[in-house]
Structures are given as C-alpha cells and as structure tokens.
Image (cartoon, rainbow, N blue to C red):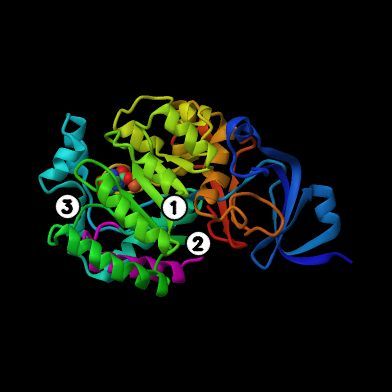
Amino acid sequence: MKESVDLLIYNIKEIVTPIAPYPKKEKLIKDISIISNGAIAIKDGKIYDISSNEKIRDLYKGEFEIDLRNENIVLPGFVDPHTHLLFGGSREDEFLLRLEGADYLEIQKRGGGIIKTKNDTFSFPEKILIEETKKRLNSGISYGITTFEIKSGYGLNIDKEIILLEIINKLREESKMKIIPTLLLHLLPEDEEIDVFLNDLSDILPYIIEKNLSHNIDIFIEKGAFDIETSDKILNKAKNLNFKISLHIDQFNDINGVDLAIKYNANSVSHIDLTKEEKLYTLGKKNIVGIIFPLERLIFSKEPKRGREIIDSGVPLSISTDFNPGTSPSLNFPLIISLSVIRESLTVEEAINASTINSAYALNLSDEIGSIERGKRADLIIFELDSFKKIPYFVGMNFIKYVIINGEVMKVV
Ligand code: NIG
Ligand code: FE
C-alpha cells in the first residue's frame, strides 16, 4: 500500500537545490545539488520526501499529482530579503532625470526621493495602499518569490512607521507567503529634534516587540540620512531588545557603516557597493550576509563585477530586488538572476544559492526555507525549462509555470 501525500511532483528533469552547510560562501557557494529524474512528495505544507522518481513513486500516492514528463525543472522559491513593497505613487520623473545626470541624494535634499514617496504614501486611503501592495505580492509570486521581507520606511516619523508596520502585518496575516516585517528608519524626522526622536524610540521599540509588529530593524546610513553616531545610539537600544539588525550601508558614499554592522553583529548588510575589501573580509568571518541589488546597480551604472569581489572576499552573498519606487522598480527575479550572472560575474550556481538559502540565512530562516529538504516548507518553483542554466540565459523572460507556497499550487499559466 502506498502512503498518501497531499501533492506529488514527479518526472522532474532536475531538482535543483542548495545543500548544507549554510550560509554558502567562499568555494562552497558554487555547490548545488541536482537530482535528475527526481520526484518530491509534499504533505501538510512541507517537503515530506525527495528522491529519485522511482523511489518516490513506489512509496507514495498523491491526492494531487503533477507530471513534469522529464521536461521541467524545480527550484526552491526565491527568498527576497530586502524590499520596500509598501508605498504609494511612483517616481518615473526622477528616474528619467537621473538618467540625464541628476543626483539621487540631491533630489532627496530638494524634497523629492524618499520624501516624495512619504507624501504620496499618506495621500492614499489605507485600503488602496493594501490593494496596491497585494498586487505587488502577486506579481512577486509570478516571478517565483515565495518569501518577502517588507520594510516600513516611508513614514519618516515613528507614529507613521507604526501605521506602516501594522499594514505590513495585516498583509502577513492574510497572505500564504512568508512575510517578514522590518522597521526601517529612512531619514531623520522633519518635525522633531533628534533628542526627542531618540527618546521616543526608547518608548516605541519595546512596544514594537511587545505587539509583535517587527523583530527586525534597518537604518539607512548615508549622507543626508542617518549618520554613524545617531545610528550607533539607535542600534544600542535595539540590540538590548534583541532586534535583529540589517543595515543600508555604503550605497552612495563609503561612510564606514560596516563597523556598526560588526559591532552589533548584524544579520545582513545591504548595498555595500563602496565598502573596502578588508572590511568585507571581516563580514565574511562573522557570517554577516552581504545583500546586493543587481538591478539597482545597473540603473545607477555602478561598476560591474561587485558580486564577484564580495564572494571572493569571503562574504556570504545574497541577491535581492530591493523593490522600491526610487532605486529599483522591478520584481522580475529571473531578470535579477540574469543580471547577477551577466554583470556581477556570478556563476549560475552561485546566483541560485544567493537568491535562496543565503537570503533565508539573512532572515534567520535557513532551517525553514531556502532549499528543498525534508521537513522544510514546500515553497517551490516549477520552470518550464529543461536546464537551470537557461534561467539567466533567457534574459527578462519568465518561464515559471507553477509556484507552490506552503504546499499549495499558486499559479498555473
Ligand atoms: O534601498 N536608499 C535607501 N533606500 C532605498 C531607496 C528608497 C527610495 O528611494 O525610495 C534603497 O535603495
Ligand atoms: Fe533598500
């Protein structure tokens, strides 16, 4: 008698998955496991078994079965560890101005940039914001994203950031996807003295933890945003409350944010476009994940091959969309993989590790998601392709046929 499972996917041309140890770094980030002619049994939203086609079909019968006829491949769902998915409006005018030479931080100084998005965001009723963000979540699923970290950050004062965190949590409760809310402090509040702001934070950070609004904090450490001294004070408070720390650093200027990441043992640092090599080396030793954004790097014409340099410095690398209306307005994850191979000099295997398990590790979730292993959440992508090497090759195209989230088939094209 065969054991019954909820879902059986069989005749899989290639099951492509990261393999332990995690995070993947140095030479091991090139390692990937490929099971040819495999099958996966799924039960109660989890990977129940994974092996050769013969073995799995001998053992199990699925309530629902998908036959891939040895033509299609399966990967773990993409984990996007850094997004600004919740906002109102758009910034195409600035995008075009920047392509003519205007400077991102100058635009911000004149009340554009993040400040414009804050105004736009709070000009919409909550219902519309939620609808727009749900559309983005669905778009993310269609590109294979099964986990989203979503930052607040367009409140620019703490009360408004709380409103945004509450909305992100509503989306989290309603969605099948895994959603991780993060408190992002983007710019100093316009309407408050810095000491008052820091005092308010001392009251509000415990509230955020207590109400389960977020256990993660991020700060935009940059000229014209938060400086090192203020960030240090904030991180000190946050660390005492066990917030997990991720930081925007060295995106447009090297202001040595990396020392703070090391001091407070951050989970991840994002951008690190201008971080010096010797500092990268320390990040690697501490297993602090470096998150880069191949699309944002392309839009800002940043020097290519940075991804390669970061890996070669020993940092566990993650790649992400950084989806936001200012610097990176696309959720096309297969495109991000293409760019990381074409422009950042990653191998395809490295790009897959960087978009799955290393991102899961950055979110402290590598025991639960980011690879196809027994007991992990059944978050999977079925590509209508017969080799994983074709993912970066078909630039900008989307060959995703099904996305499975928590064992449920979400999209059938
Ligand atoms: O990661 N630069 C800081 N934060 C975002 C951009 C936000 C925006 O421009 O709206 C980033 O690039
Ligand atoms: Fe960002």
- Horizontal and vertical percent position of residue 242: 45, 62
Alpha carbon separation for disc pair 1 and 2: 10 Å
Disc with the residue nearer the chain's start (1 vs 3): 3
Query: Does the CB distance between marks 1 and 2 fall below 8 Å?
Result: yes
What residue did someone put label 2 on?
177
Helix, strand or loop status at disc 3: helix
* Residue with the most extreme left position: 110
Alpha carbon separation for disc pair 3 and 2: 29 Å
Disc 2 CB within 8 Å of nearest ligand 2 atom: no
Give the number of the mark in front: 1 or 3: 3
Q: Tell me if I can see residue 358 in this picture.
A: yes
- Amino acid type, callout 3: Lys
Q: Tell me if I can see residue 144 in this picture.
A: no
Label 2: how many residues lie within 10 Å, few (<14), some (14-19) or many (20+)? Answer: many
Does the magenta run of residues contain 168?
Answer: yes
Q: Is residue 408 left or right of residue 295?
A: right
Give the number of the mark in front: 1 or 2: 2
Query: Does the CB distance between marks 1 and 3 fall below 8 Å?
Result: no
Label 1: how many residues lie within 10 Å, few (<14), some (14-19) or many (20+)? Answer: many
What residue did someone put label 1 on?
140
Does the magenta run of residues contain 18?
Answer: no
> Residue 300 sits in which quadrant?
top left
> Residue 256 sits in which quadrant?
top left
- Horizontal and vertical percent position of residue 343: 43, 26
